[in-house]
Image (tube, helix red, strand yellow):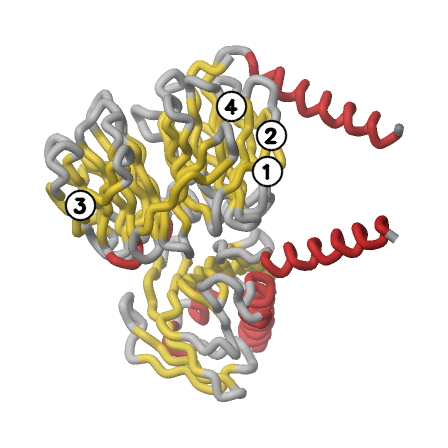
């Protein structure tokens, strides 16, 4: 009986704290690898609003705006957490071993998972909680990006390539040679460009999503990790983990036009909130996130999070009510 | 009887699932601080001397050619272990030095992709605070690491090493 009461109590507390988020705002969803939690940050109020316990060592994140759900990859417990933002219901899904990056097709309800140690991509039907097929790829698949035209781009860290898969036929289309140890793969529906961070060659490779060709390789800071695409000025922001910096690349010139130094220790996940005019950066070593002004790049606020924030993937949900 | 069998099955299942439970490496961090009763400028002179890193009492020898970024040093320990490090950052204004491990010996420092930074900060009362930070992966990068090379033990070793180094630095700086 007591247990039941305490369960309801804890549920109410979580639910109430979440309810407070519901005034319309952009939210940032931060995976905390050292705390096994996800923090929800209200970017209008610039405050942490809730903390949700997920699986072990959460790293990757994918938010589906249409279904109002998000997924985290939990490499520590070899599963996926799926959280419904409407009622905060949290369920575990199969993720295969050492799940990393996540991409989701809302029409087919299929979640694509890169399995670091298994050298494969698992395809999970989230309705049935069943891995329906597996695609073998090269050594250590990391970041991924799924296009509207059913192409899945996968960084193969151990082989210095990006593998492109047709998700309909589930066949490999092509391997594109990139820099050394590619890790993150990012893009946006508004651009035909795709961006790859090469950790060991300290560079970003830009690939054309239509021609499937590498266009250029641009030097950035040490250990580039994640990239945010800015659709108005056509820029990308690259976090350089070992330099504590952000490289800003002008996509009209394919050149670094500015480097923001000393942003924080080990900047990792980065994303943009257009409504709040902010760049949000997860600072792994500092256990906080920082908010930078999207125009001036000045620090607006630091917000403490649960521990070891990574947020590998796009982690901002716009106009959340 | 049936109930007992069921219970046994549950227990077996439990053990089976826990042995299968294994996970990949996640990045570790260690951050240690120490207060030194010496002026920051004096401490910084010792800290920035990349060629002569002998703060830790277990280090018997340190050889390096230069004190400039890009220079490499080999540190030898009393147990015979050798660790090769590369100077990556040196900032006089911020009083910050950073290095990376190029080659390690898992007996001493079971790590991968290890990078460390040391910050010297001036306090108002003519003392200084030293912050030694390291980010790294465990000694065994694959799945199912042997116990001595798992996340927990790798972190413990780094923590011990850093603590001992800071204690040694304090001793050297406060001596003269």
Residue A185 lies in what quarter of the image? top left
- Answer yes or no: do the residues labelled 3 and 1 have beta carbons within 8 Å? no
In the displayed structure, would residue B141 be above or below residue A168? Answer: below
- Real-space Cα separation, disc 1 to disc 4, in angstroms: 23 Å
Query: Quick check: do tags 3 and 1 share a chain?
Result: yes
- Foreground label between 1 and 4: 1
Circle 4: element type: loop
Pointer 1 local density, CA inside 10 Å: few below 14, some 14–19, many at least 20: many
Residue A262 lies in what quarter of the image? top left
- Kindly identify the residue that appears in the image at 22 percent across and 36 percent down: A194
Q: Can you tell which mark lies on residue A174?
A: 3
Q: Position of residue A36 (x, y in %)?
A: 59, 43
Q: Can you tell which mark lies on residue A90?
A: 2
Counting residues from the N terminus, which is met first, the one under dot 4 or under dot 2? 4
Q: Position of residue A76 (x, y in %)?
A: 55, 50
| Quadrant into which the N terminus of chain A falls | top right
- Real-space Cα separation, disc 3 to disc 1, in angstroms: 35 Å
Circle 2: element type: strand
Counting residues from the N terminus, which is met first, the one under dot 1 or under dot 4? 4
Counting residues from the N terminus, which is met first, the one under dot 1 or under dot 2? 1
Counting residues from the N terminus, which is met first, the one under dot 4 or under dot 3? 4
- Answer yes or no: do the residues labelled 1 and 2 have beta carbons within 8 Å? yes
- Real-space Cα separation, disc 4 to disc 2, in angstroms: 25 Å
Judging from the image, mark 2 belongs to the subunit labelled A
In the displayed structure, would residue B9 be above or below residue B85? Answer: above
Q: Is residue A257 left or right of residue B8?
A: left
Circle 3: element type: strand
Pointer 2 local density, CA inside 10 Å: few below 14, some 14–19, many at least 20: some
Judging from the image, mark 1 belongs to the subunit labelled A
Judging from the image, mark 3 belongs to the subunit labelled A
- Foreground label between 1 and 2: 2
Residue at the front extreme of this rendering: B2
């Amino acid at each position: 009986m007591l247990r039941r009461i305490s369960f309801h109590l804890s549920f109410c507390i979580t639910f109430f704290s979440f309810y407070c988020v519901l005034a319309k705002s952009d939210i940032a969803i931060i995976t905390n690898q050292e705390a096994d939690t996800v923090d929800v940050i209200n970017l209008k109020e610039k405050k942490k609003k809730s903390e949700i316990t997920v699986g072990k060592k959460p790293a990757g994140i994918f938010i589906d705006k249409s279904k109002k759900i998000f997924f985290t990859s939990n490499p520590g417990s070899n599963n996926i957490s799926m959280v419904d933002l409407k009622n905060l219901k949290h369920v575990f899904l199969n993720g295969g071993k050492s799940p990393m990056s996540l991409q989701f097709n809302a029409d087919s309800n299929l979640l694509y998972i890169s399995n670091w140690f298994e050298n494969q991509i698992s395809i999970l039907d989230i309705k049935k909680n069943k891995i329906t097929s597996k695609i073998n790829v090269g050594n250590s698949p990391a970041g991924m990006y799924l296009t509207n035209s059913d192409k899945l781009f996968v960084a193969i860290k151990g082989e210095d390539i990006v593998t492109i898969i047709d998700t309909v036929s589930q066949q490999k289309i092509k391997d594109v040679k990139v820099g050394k140890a590619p890790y993150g793969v990012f893009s946006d529906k508004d651009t035909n460009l795709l961006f790859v961070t090469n950790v060991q060659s300290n560079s970003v490779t830009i690939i054309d999503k239509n021609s499937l060709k590498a266009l250029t390789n641009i030097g950035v800071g040490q250990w580039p990790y994640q990239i945010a695409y800015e659709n108005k000025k056509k820029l990308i922001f690259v976090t350089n983990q070992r330099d504590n910096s952000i490289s800003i690349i002008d996509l009209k010139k394919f050149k670094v036009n500015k480097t923001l130094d000393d942003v924080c220790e080990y900047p990792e996940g980065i994303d943009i909130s257009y409504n709040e005019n902010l760049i949000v950066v997860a600072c792994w070593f500092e256990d906080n996130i920082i908010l930078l002004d999207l125009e001036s790049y000045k620090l607006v606020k630091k917000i403490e999070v649960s521990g070891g924030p990574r947020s590998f993937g796009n982690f901002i949900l716009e106009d959340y009510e | 009887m049936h109930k007992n069998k069921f219970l046994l099955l549950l227990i077996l299942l439990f053990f089976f699932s826990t042995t299968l439970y294994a996970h990949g490496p996640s990045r570790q961090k260690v951050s240690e601080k120490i207060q030194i009763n010496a002026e920051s400028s004096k401490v910084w002179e010792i800290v920035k001397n990349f060629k002569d890193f002998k703060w830790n009492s277990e280090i018997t020898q340190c050889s390096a050619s230069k004190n400039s970024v890009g220079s490499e040093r080999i540190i030898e320990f009393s147990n015979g272990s050798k660790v090769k490090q590369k100077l990556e950052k040196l900032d006089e204004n911020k009083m910050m030095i950073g290095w990376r491990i190029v080659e390690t010996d898992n007996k001493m420092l079971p790590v991968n992709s290890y990078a460390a930074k040391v910050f010297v900060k001036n306090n108002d009362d003519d003392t200084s605070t030293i912050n030694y930070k390291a980010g790294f992966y465990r000694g065994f990068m694959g799945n199912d690491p042997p116990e001595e090379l798992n996340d927990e033990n790798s972190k413990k070793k780094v923590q011990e090493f850093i603590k001992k180094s800071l204690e040694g630095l304090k001793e050297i700086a406060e001596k003269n």
